[in-house]
Every structure is written in structure tokens, then in C-alpha cells.
Image: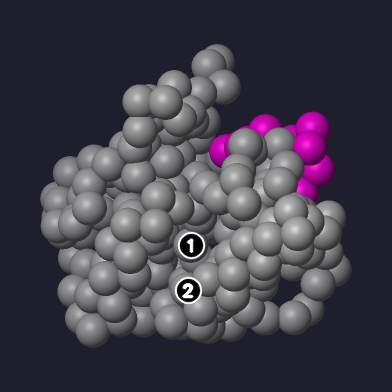
Amino acid sequence: MSAAEGVIRFEYQLDRALAPFATGAEFMRLNAWRSILHRLTLLGQCATRYEGYGFGNVSLRCAQDPAAFLITASQTGGKFRTEVEDWAQVTQADLQQFRVDAIGLLPPSSEAMTHAMIYAADQQVNCVLHVHSPDIWRQTSELALSHTDARVAYGTPDLASHVSRLFKAHAMRPMVFTTLGHEDGVFACGRDVDTAAHALLDVLAAALACQSEARS
């Protein structure tokens, strides 16, 4: 199977309809933050990055059904603004069978299983942001960031298992961690959209400060 960014590596059953819970103030807040992350090129699509595939995805636990979550659909990273049709609602994730049931016009992001593992690992996490930041990723050690093993590829059962262990080992929230086996991969998780986003930007600022210090 191709190791390219954006390849879905889990089985899924898709009920083709608009995601019913893609509404409300917190969802609109997430969508606004997603546009900000796009402007910062922390998610998006570029011919010279990751073989031209879209990269980055964001999700939100559904208040109406805490077992479900909304996530950007596969290969929507290139859009600055997303509409309801660009989202999928994962209604059930089977972490053992590596399979999800979802509602949407497009399949959920290729990282949906990693998001599912994070939500299963901590019921207090209600938002997950997955971005690609070389600035943060390359300074994982300098920033003392939690991380998954470099031998573990993206979107795999191994990555999901590593994430679960990471959450058990590190209790502090919000949490920002890198995936060393997934080029430039960074996850930020928090109790709500703003908490996750602010934690991510705080780490980005620290990474940029580190770079400036190293050059001086």
C-alpha cells in the first residue's frame, strides 16, 4: 500500500448524507480555526509538499453523542473554507477491527482512527487538531515534546496503539505531541477548540523562538 499522505488505511462504511451534527457555535469555531491554520500553512495542499496530497485535519467530539465526532473529510486540506459537505461524522470506531462507520458525502480523513483513539483514551478531550509543522516536528527533542516512535507510520494500528500509550503516560492537558514516523506530523488535543488551538500556537511560538536562538 502506498505510504503517501492521505491514503485511507482503515475500512469504513459510509452513509452518504450530510453530517447531521455539523452545526452549532463550537463547530463554527472549529471551522474558523481551521481557516487560520490554513493561512499559517499548518494544513492545506501544495504541489511541492507530501506528493501534492492535502494534509492536516481537525475534529470535534459531538456534544449530542459523545461517542461520535466530526472530522474533515479526506483530501479537503486544500480548501481555505469548508462547507458541511466537506465534513464526515464518525458514528462508531472499532479500534480492534480498524473500521469506522460514518455519515458524510465524502469519507472521513485518513487520520480518523488516530482521532478516534485519542477520544477513546481521554473523555475530557473534545477537540483534536492534526497539522504538519516542520518547525515543531524537527524540534521535538529541544521542546521536550511527547512523541510517537519514528518507526510507526501514519494511519496504522501501530500508531493508534502508540497514541493510546502516550495518553496513559502523560496526564497533562492540553497536549501537543509529534508523530516522528509521519513527516512533520503534530497533534494538539484539548477540552475545547480554543484550548487545543492555543496550545498548538504556543508550541509553534516556542519552536520559532528556539530557531532564532540557535541562529543567534
Tell me the CA gap for discs 2 and 1. Answer: 7 Å
- In the rendered view, tell whether residue 66 sits above or below residue 179: below
Q: Give the numbered dot on residue 76.
A: none
- In the rendered view, tell whether residue 54 sits above or below residue 164: above
Q: Which secondary structure is most common in the magenta stretch?
A: loop
Residue shown at 42% from the left, 78% from the top: 193
Structural crowding at the residue carrying mark 1, measured as other residues with C-alpha within 10 Å and reported as few (<14), some (14–19) or many (≥20): many
Q: Give the numbered dot on residue 197.
A: 2
Would you name the residue on which mark 1 appears? Answer: 129
The quarter of the image holding the C terminus is: bottom right
Secondary element at image label 2: helix
Where are the magenta residues, as a range? 148-156
Q: Is residue 159 left or right of residue 81?
A: right
| Foreground residue among 73 and 195 | 195
**In the rendered image, is residue 70 in sight?**
no
The furthest residue to the top:
1
**In the rendered image, is residue 174 in sight?**
yes
